[in-house]
Image: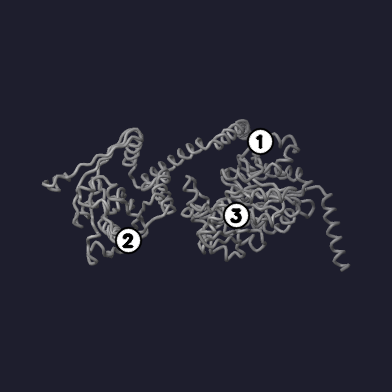
Amino acid sequence: MSCAVGMTDHRVRSNVACSQVPADRCELVTDFHRLEELSSQWERLWESDPRAEIFQTPEWSKAWWRAFGQDYSLCSLAVFAGHQMVGIVPLVRRDNFVQFLGLPEADYADIICEEHRATEVLALALKTLGESVTGWTECGFEHLPRHSRLVRHYRALPREIRARLHRVPAERQYTIILRNQREEVFKSLLGKNHTRRLQNKLRKAGQLRFRHLQTPDEIEAYLPDFFRHHVRRHAAIGRRSVCARPEFCQFIRAIIQELGPRGRVRFGVLELDGRALAWELAFQVNGKFMLYQHTFDLDASHYTPGEVILWNALEYARDNVSREFDFGSGDELYKDRFANYSRETYSLFVTPRGLRGWVRGSARGIQAFVQPGFSKMKEIAKSRRMTLRAFRAARMWMLGTWGCVRQARKNGSLLQCGLHLTKKVFGNSVWSRRSADVFALEPSRLGDGDPLLSTPSEGDQDVRVAQFGDLVDLSWQHPEILSLNELAQCRKRLQNGDHVYIVRENSDVVSVCWASGPAEAAAAPGTARIGIAASTPAIVIDELWSIRDRDLSASYRLLLSVLAREASRQKANILVYCSSEQPALRRELEHQGSRPTFRITRYRALGRLQRESVRPYPANSSYSAQAA
């Protein structure tokens, strides 16, 4: 016992003695193995700060380097006082830009050092950066919270260094500061009637369970769904998810392996009758809960599982978090409803000496001057929902259009794409006229052995009913089929009872079909002319896309067979709208013994005014003449 006390006293005296020794050496670390050798001292410095973030841990840097390091070169700066490291500035370089190791995946960044040494560590590190690292045009210290050591101490640097520093305001981070009002804060948040009603709605639907997974292996089983639904949720609002990058998915797996065993990772799952509806990835250190990434199943959005899992995360924080609940980066609207504080973040840019550095520094000075105005405009737009919707609609349209152009360039069909987009814009905003011949199939009158009601063997083709999440995937992967700005209308159609069928061949989409119904036959124009009783329900196929320049007979045959069996089960008929641009569909309908009974023409003017006209085919005229 006395020996242990003696060792402790010796360590304390050693630390005190070291704290009195000035920092005298800065080592440029270009080999990650050397950085790993310094990890124990790095961890000691990190643990000395009661407000240190998870993003400055050696484990975070190790996981990040494993996922992204192949695109960067290491140029970290370790500052020593004698033989002991007293500060570290983990940096990497890509092309001519130097940045923090771990960005942009880290929500916060800072130097790691003893508090009273922040100025001398920063001064020595920046001096070494300028002298030992060549060819860089700018060093960006980004994602700096207002309380970071860099923001608090950079003004105390020598004048020669400070003249090359430029602070630029960045985004605001939304958080819940608990302070001494912890009980009152959580009582107010968890007592929101709206969220409680959503929780009760889910409980009535089945067995609801929220839990934090305990081991990396258990978390790994849920990660594929987490990544897939994260991509879908962001695509639905016109954003590219970070999980769409394989490197980021690798990084998340590495983070869980590095931090999971230390109890710093919280991976929560919300399940209804064993089906996962929502997921969250969070970190918990130093009395703080950091909600890093979260998502939910779009096909369960009527339950609003995103809000329910947030309610459960807050309930967990009430019992396990003492200082802060941070919502992480992003300016989503829901954060305003829960947060009680918005934290300013900054970027601090360092420019080298010389004319090029002066020019770049001048540009950063202008950016620092105008950035607050842009941020204010963004806040105003965010507070006005109509303006926000308009901006979102414009962004979705631009992303969808650019996706079509990109795909057309890949296929060598830019001219056709341009003509199609021009025609579409003109038709939606000025005037359009579309005609289609309507074919009728009556599966309800067919026998069980009829070929139409059988399941044709079409090799590697299959037909599936799609949900909204599948349409989001389709719009992101095949913008030439479905544009992002059409997703809102697709959601409405699905909510109104319409169905969408996707035909795939070897996992590639070859055809997409919208079917309305079963609806009353009287609701479809002209049904009285084809001899269908008004009380007979009908499945109406009024929109069908197919890939061009290939034989689609097998795809149409399979699709019609699936629809015919569904119509037969519901004792319904099928109405197929076929335009002149779908000759393969027309041939397959003829093969099934169907003929067009009337032609419907739809007019649209100024984007809103719509009119339909129906013209029956004369009974005494040949079909071929009418088709011509």
Name the outermost residue toward the bottom: 1
Residue 250 visible, this angle: yes
Residue at the spot x=84%, y=56% of the render?
Answer: 14
Q: How many marks?
A: 3
Quote the CA–CA distance across marks 2 and 3: 41 Å
Instruction: Mark 2 and mark 3 in contact? Answer it, CB < 8 Å.
Output: no
Instruction: Mark 1 and mark 3 in contact? Answer it, CB < 8 Å.
Output: no
Mark 2 or mark 3: which comes first in sequence?
A: 3
Q: Is residue 240 above or below residue 460?
A: above
| Residue nearer the viewer, 275 or 239 | 275
| Residue 62 found in image quarter | bottom right
- Dot 2 surroundings within 10 Å: few (below 14), some, or many (20 or more)? some
Residue located beneath label 2 in the image: 461
The nearer-to-camera label among 2 and 1 is 2
Quote the CA–CA distance across marks 1 and 3: 27 Å
Label 3 sits on what residue type? Trp
Q: Position of residue 445 (x, y in %)?
A: 22, 60
Q: Position of residue 296 (x, y in %)?
A: 52, 54
| Residue nearer the viewer, 59 or 266 | 266
